[in-house]
Amino acid sequence: MSENRHHGRATSSQSLAPGARIERHCHPLHQIVYPSSGAVSVTTPAGTWITPVNRAIWIPAGCWHEHKFHGQTQFHGVALDPRRYRGGPATPTVLAVNPLMRELIIASSQTDGTDTDEHHRMLAVLHDQVRDSNIHEPLWIPTPVDSRLRQACALITDNLTEPLTLQQIGRRIGVSQRTLSRLFSDELGMTFPQWRTQLRLHHALMLLADRHDVTSVALQCGWATPSAFIDTYRRAFGHTPGARRA
């Protein structure tokens, strides 16, 4: 099936089909991206961020990015002029969304009347919420630069159901375990187990958005049991994958 492609507008509210994309673009404005249903991934040259319905992504002005949508997604984008709304993360960041932020994002994403006093008052409160928000541990899959690390990451991604050790991966690609461990730490800023957990959660969110059941998601993403997946998911998001659908 061909993918639907859409053009990026910094402030918008759209209903998008599974697999839809907004092609690579950038804005002179900061942007908050939020799915009130489904899930959205944001890819930049530095890597890919993904957010479920209780998270938003902050994209700073001037950052080239593209979106892909997983499951039937109600997408909300809100633009903030950096000349007026100063401060905020300098890099794409996944944010925890409280009930007030959720309502402000949804209301501010409506394209009618975006230059009214009422709209700017909402943006001012939203910007304060972003600055005061507890920034969630980023669901970020960084893009590796070193060719050996790229090989290792591709091997893991293509064999996510296999519980490969770093030593086994190193043997397959001809790189020592110690070298791979150092590359994960130095280049990606996390250990191999941390990176693989991020990768598994990333894929799990996409599958859950496409309405796969919890047991199927656990097995497809490499967890030994559904309970192990549920425990990891709860620690990452504060609730179970079943509660996400409620």
Image: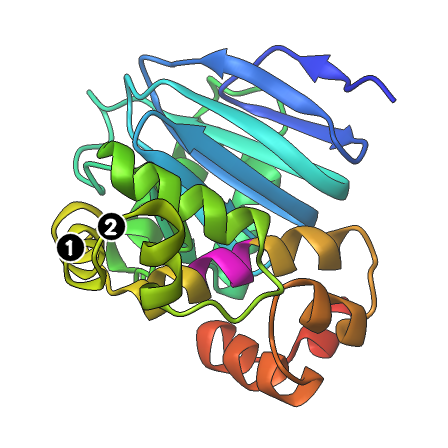
Q: In the rendered image, which quarter is residue 71 located in?
A: top right
For residue 108, what is the image quadrant? top right
Q: Type of residue at label 1?
A: Thr
Residue 140: x %, y % from top left: 38, 49
* Residue sitting at the far right: 1
Q: In the image, which disc is placed on residue 179?
A: 1
* Pick the front one: 97 or 6: 6
Residue 211: image location, x then y, percent: 83, 57
- Decide: marks 1, 2 in contact (CB < 8 A)? yes
Point out residue 67 in the picture as x, y percentages from the top left corner.
Answer: 56, 28
The relative height of residue 192 versus residue 81 in the rendered view (above or below) is: below
Q: Residues within 10 Å of mark 1 (few under 14, many from 20)?
A: few
Residue 21 percent coordinates (x, y): 65, 23
Residues in magenta, as a range:
198-202
Q: Is residue 166 left or right of residue 116?
A: left
- Residue type marked 2: Val
In this view, the mark in front (1 or 2)? 2
Check if residue 54 falls in the magenta segment. Answer: no
Q: In front here: 10 or 86?
A: 10
Residue 175 disc label: 2
Q: How many marks?
A: 2
Q: Is residue 151 left or right of residue 88?
A: right
Q: Is residue 157 above or below residue 144?
A: below
User: From the viewer's perspective, is residue 101 above or below residue 232?
Assistant: above
Which residue is found at the position 53% from the left and 62% from the top? Answer: 201
From this viewpoint, is residue 86 visible? yes
Q: Is residue 46 left or right of residue 40?
A: left
Predominant secondary structure in magenta?
helix
Mark 2 crowdedness (10 Å alpha carbons): few <14, some 14-19, many ≥20: some
Image quarter in which the N terminus is found: top right
Q: Secondary structure at mark 2?
A: loop
